[in-house]
Image (tube, grey):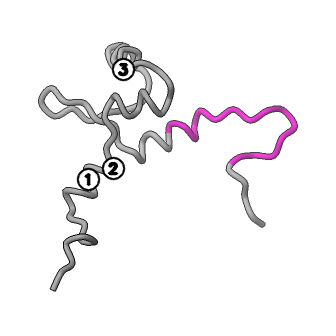
């Protein structure tokens, strides 16, 4: 018997792997309008558009953030690597 309280379907996983513009705007402390402007200008992060809905893949958000990380001069690289 499957315990429905712990069962996660593929649809649930997909929903969690996508961020809405409002969720990304909250994460980055910008407005949804700013994200819309970036999309219109062909800049910023890639996105999924289905019908009129826009979503951002969580993996793309993390990759974009890592690519745009600026390390202060003289500090250790981030993320920290282990030898």
Residue underneath mark 2:
17
> x, y (%) of residue 74?
87, 37
Q: Quadrant of the C terminus?
A: bottom right
Quarter occupied by residue 40: top left
**Mark whose residue sits in front, 3 or 1:** 3
- Residue at image coords 36%, 20%: 32
What is the residue that sits farthest to the left in this orientation? 51
Indicate yes or no whether the magenta region holds residue 6: no
User: Residue 68, how many percent across, how many down?
Assistant: 59, 32
Is the residue under label 2 in contact with that under label 3 (CB below 8 Å)? no
Instruction: Residue 14: give its label.
Output: 1
- The percent position of residue 36, horizontal first and vertical second, equals 33, 17
Task: For mark 2, give the secondary structure.
Answer: helix
> Which residue appears at 81% of the width and 46% of the height?
76
Q: Which residue is mark 3?
A: 32
Question: Disc 3 or 1, which lies upstream in sequence?
Answer: 1
Q: Is residue 71 left or right of residue 2?
A: right
Outermost residue toward the front in this view: 5
Q: Secondary structure at mark 1?
A: helix
Q: Secondary structure at mark 3?
A: helix
Give the prevailing secondary structure in the magenta stretch. loop
Q: Quick one: label 3 or label 2, which is nearer the N terminus? A: 2
Instruction: Please state which of residues 16 and 6 is positioned toward the viewer in this rendering.
Output: 6
Q: Do labels 3 and 1 touch, CB within 8 Å?
A: no
Residue 15 x, y percent position in the rendering = 26, 49
**Residues packed near mark 1 inside 10 Å, few (<14), some (14 to 19) or many (20 plus):** few
Real-space Cα separation, disc 3 to disc 1, in angstroms = 22 Å
Instruction: From the viewer's side, name the closer residue of 34 and 45.
Output: 34
Local packing at callout 2 (Cα closer than 10 Å; few below 14, some 14-19, many 20+) is some
Q: Is residue 75 left or right of residue 70?
A: right
**Gap in Å between the C-alphas at discs 2 and 1?**
5 Å
Q: Which residues are magenta?
A: 64-78
């Amino acid at each position: 018997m499957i315990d429905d309280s712990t069962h996660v379907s593929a649809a649930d996983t997909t929903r969690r792997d996508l961020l809405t513009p409002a969720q990304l705007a909250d994460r980055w402390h910008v407005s949804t309008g700013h994200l819309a402007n970036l999309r219109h200008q062909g800049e910023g992060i890639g996105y999924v558009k289905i019908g009129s809905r826009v979503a951002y893949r969580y993996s793309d958000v993390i990759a974009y953030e890592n690519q745009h990380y600026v390390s202060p001069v003289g500090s250790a690289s981030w993320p920290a690597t282990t030898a």
